[in-house]
Amino acid sequence: MLRRGRPVEAIDAFLACLQARPDFALAYVNLAETLRSLGLLDQALWAAQTAQQLLPDQPEAHIVLASTLHDRSEYEAAELEYRRALDIVPHHPGVLSSLGNTLHAMGRLAEALSLHDRAIAAAPEDPDFHYNRAATRLAAGDYARGWSDYEWRLLREQARCELGPGWRGEDIAGTTILLHAEQGLGDTLQFVRYAPLVAARGMRVVLEVQPPLVTLMRSLPGPEKVIGFGDSRPPFDAHCSLLSLPHVLKTTLQTVPAHVPYLHADPSAIQLWAGRLPEDAGLRVGIVWAGSSHREDAGAHLIDQRRSTTREAFAALADIPGIHLVSLQKPERSETPAPLANFALIDLMPGVADFADTAALIANLDLVISVDTSVAHLAGALGQRVWLLSRYDACWRWLRDRSDSPWYPRLRIYRQPRPHDWSDVIARVRHDLIVWTSETNRRSSVAPAT
């Protein structure tokens, strides 16, 4: 039933089996994996621990327990279980790669790469193992080899493209190329910067993106036409995913095309949104505390739980003199929010129709503070000052152990010191916001009259 996409019925079947045979250890393994696939991690942990107790010499029990612990961000415990599995099956490529992912999450990139190399040596045609190594290489700044590995994502089932083989950098000046978005909104906002570079090679660029981005993308120089998913595609001679362009154009850490802004808000829309904001003195600081929940995808939902915080966490910034906090949070997470005492939050997001509106609102702000979501990319692409709040197991695009980003010159990164610990991050943001506000106000007070 699980393989048929009916996990709830599968759980019922496993529980019925265990009621009849409480010592049937493999049923606990399968139950744990099914619960984990649904994001029910507390229940999965119980089932996995039971399986491990019943099957201490079987790698499957250690693997499912390790995977569950990893999903719970209990990385040290996950590492121990993966290593116990490797004691039993030393060359198991799946365990090697999964342990590499766990070490990557802890920032131990060199060790992670060694494990990914071993996994690929054992199973050289498995795209998942190359994809995992790509994330670690890219996080380490090894773009030359990382982008190459990242192309293996196109062989994974969820990323297959129906358009056939893509453009690989050959000279096709004078033809029409379709550049298409592939993953999330943030990915599109980050990598659409390559579209003008492709147009500069003499190709007519048709850009296909998610519908909420269409209006905004028409401000991007280069494309002759911007369409949304589901729109009729004009004829084209070649195509390329936006996320393949860094590989095609041979981007290194030193050659990231970081000129900003490359997206622009409409001047009339900027003026419109300016009229909806307070006119009194003070710095306007946009905040985003959560990304899209992705409840339809258990894996993406788990990542969202790690990258997102709460509106209440930002209340620690509300009493800083001289600032107005402005919500940039999607209505999905801000519908009818309960008022918080002493937390004055300006919320105009119910009137935002798409990213063009959000861009115009951001253009009226002095700073954007956001968790790792599409709004942070939007603000960065607009050339806005951005403070990014990054989860402990940071996305590969933010590299490791640095507070800046080669992708967005005005972005500063605040990293969690421990999984799920936002209090330390917010405390550092509060300190720096007080300092920045004070310095900005002081510069304004001594500026010569014009």
Image (cartoon, grey):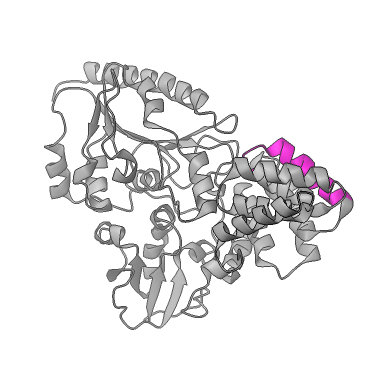
- For the record, the magenta segment spans 70-87
The residue nearer to you, when weighing 191 against 72, is 72
Is residue 196 on the magenta stretch? Answer: no
Task: Reply yes or no: does residue 86 show up in magenta.
Answer: yes
Please identify the quarter of the rendering in which residue 94 is found. bottom right
Vertical position of residue 276 compared to residue 29: above or below: above
* Residue 176 x/y as whole percent: 36, 79
| Residue 258 seen in the figure | yes
Furthest-front residue in this view: 20
Counting from the top left corner in percent of width and height, residue 238 is at: 43, 80
Main SS of the magenta part reads helix
Q: Residue at x 26, y 56 (%)?
A: 216
Left or right: residue 143 versus residue 281 is right
User: Is residue 65 or residue 167 the one in the foreground?
Assistant: 65
Name the quadrant of the C terminus. Answer: top left
How many marks the image carries: the answer is: 0
Where in the figure is residue 108, as x and y percent of width and height?
A: 71, 41
Residue 397 is left or right of residue 122, and the answer is left
Q: Is residue 156 left or right of residue 22?
A: left
Q: Is residue 436 visible?
A: no
353 lies above or below 287: below
Report x, y in % for residue 243: 49, 62
| Image quadrant containing the N terminus | bottom right
Residue at 34% x, 41% y: name it.
333
Q: Is residue 233 left or right of residue 278?
A: right
Which residue does the image show at 79% across and 45% down from the upper left? Answer: 52
